[in-house]
């Protein structure tokens, strides 16, 4: 069974606080009503649904919106955090200092990446002036920036949500793993560098010769989401988004008998 898939070139705050409605988006588990999401494939919806994101809401389910001035134009933003801990720190360290009365009514609320996508799409249709922003984990941004610089491309900071993908240096092919019984194999895209490193180290131990021809590629989540929605490359559907270890533990705490994502198995030797 091949342990690789080729994808070709497919992948390549300050201000006042107010609130806006959620429009009935659901919580984990279940992740809400996804049928209305403007995605072409149920498989893509499922990929996005597996990843939790976290935002702040009041008891009515309304988002916290930050308003700030950018030059002469005011900007309103809603933050969706990749890390639940980051969302909680933002509430504790920022909002409770600026507006303790309001902050005392707020909570960190989990949604799915699919829910976030739906909110953004609906916002575009309505020409909503509010910007819905995904906030990456700064440690992973630093890791992504360092890796890109080590590979010869000079950047001050990775802009976006970094994903880490074990791949072969030659022929633009990616390591694959089995997720269930059968012959299907998938390409893991990790939200944490450490997860990608662990998988790659297992592969290097199992197949040292081929392991020497591997590396970890950094890609942007937004680019992957766009590719999932628009690419004609059939291999794109082999992508699996692996939540961070923190997020996996969070989901397991809500549904102890359900595993949101199996531990990646070591890929087989390349054939």
Image: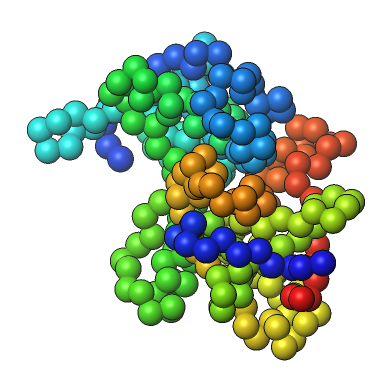
**Residue at image location 49% in from the left, 57% down from the top:** 10
Q: Position of residue 116 (x, y in %)?
A: 51, 31
**145 above or below 107?**
below
Confirm whether residue 100 shows in the render: no
The furthest residue to the bottom: 209
**Residue at image location 72% in from the left, 38% down from the top:** 251
Instruction: Report which quarter residue 26 is drawn in.
Output: top right
**Left or right of 246 in this view: 66:** left
Q: Which of the pair 249/102 is nearer the observer?
A: 249
Q: Position of residue 84 (x, y in %)?
A: 57, 40
Instruction: Report which quarter residue 247 is drawn in.
Output: top right
Q: Which of the pair 169/197 is nearer the observer?
A: 169
The furthest residue to the left: 72
* Quadrant in which the N terminus appears: bottom right
* Quadrant in which the C terminus appears: bottom right
**2 above or below 227?**
below
**Left or right of 149 in this view: 186:** right
Labels in figure, total:
0
**266 above or below 234?**
below
Q: Which of the pair 44/137 is nearer the observer?
A: 44
Q: Where is residue 224 in the image (x, y as percent from the top left)?
A: 51, 49
**Left or right of 67 in this view: 207:** right
Q: Where is residue 80 in the image (x, y as percent from the top left)?
A: 47, 35
**Residue at image location 18% in from the left, 33% down from the top:** 69
**28 above or below 154?**
above
**Left or right of 171 in this view: 269:** right
């Amino acid at each position: 069974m091949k342990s690789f898939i080729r994808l070709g070139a497919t992948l390549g705050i300050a201000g006042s606080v107010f609130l806006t409605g959620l429009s009935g988006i659901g919580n984990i588990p279940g992740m809400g009503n996804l049928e209305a999401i403007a995605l072409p494939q149920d498989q893509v919806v499922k990929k996005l649904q597996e990843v939790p994101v976290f935002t702040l809401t009041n008891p009515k389910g309304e988002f916290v919106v930050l308003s700030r001035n950018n030059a002469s134009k005011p900007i309103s933003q809603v933050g969706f955090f990749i890390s639940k801990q980051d969302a909680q720190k933002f509430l504790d360290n920022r909002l409770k200092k600026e507006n303790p009365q309001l902050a005392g009514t707020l909570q960190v609320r989990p949604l799915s990446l699919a829910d976030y996508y739906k909110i953004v799409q609906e916002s575009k249709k309505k020409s909503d002036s509010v910007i819905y922003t995904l906030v990456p984990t700064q440690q992973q941004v630093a890791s992504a920036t360092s890796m890109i610089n080590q590979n010869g491309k000079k950047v001050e900071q990775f802009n976006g949500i970094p994903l880490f993908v074990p791949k072969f240096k030659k022929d633009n092919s990616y390591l694959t793993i089995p997720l269930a019984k059968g012959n299907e194999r998938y390409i893991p895209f990790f939200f944490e560098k450490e997860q990608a490193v662990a998988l790659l180290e297992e592969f290097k131990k199992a197949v040292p010769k081929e392991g020497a021809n591997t590396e970890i590629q950094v890609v942007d989540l937004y680019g992957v989401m766009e590719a999932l929605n628009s690419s004609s490359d059939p291999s794109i559907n082999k992508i699996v988004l692996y939540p961070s270890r923190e997020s996996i533990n969070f989901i397991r705490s809500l549904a102890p008998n359900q595993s949101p994502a199996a531990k990646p198995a070591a890929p087989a030797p390349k054939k």
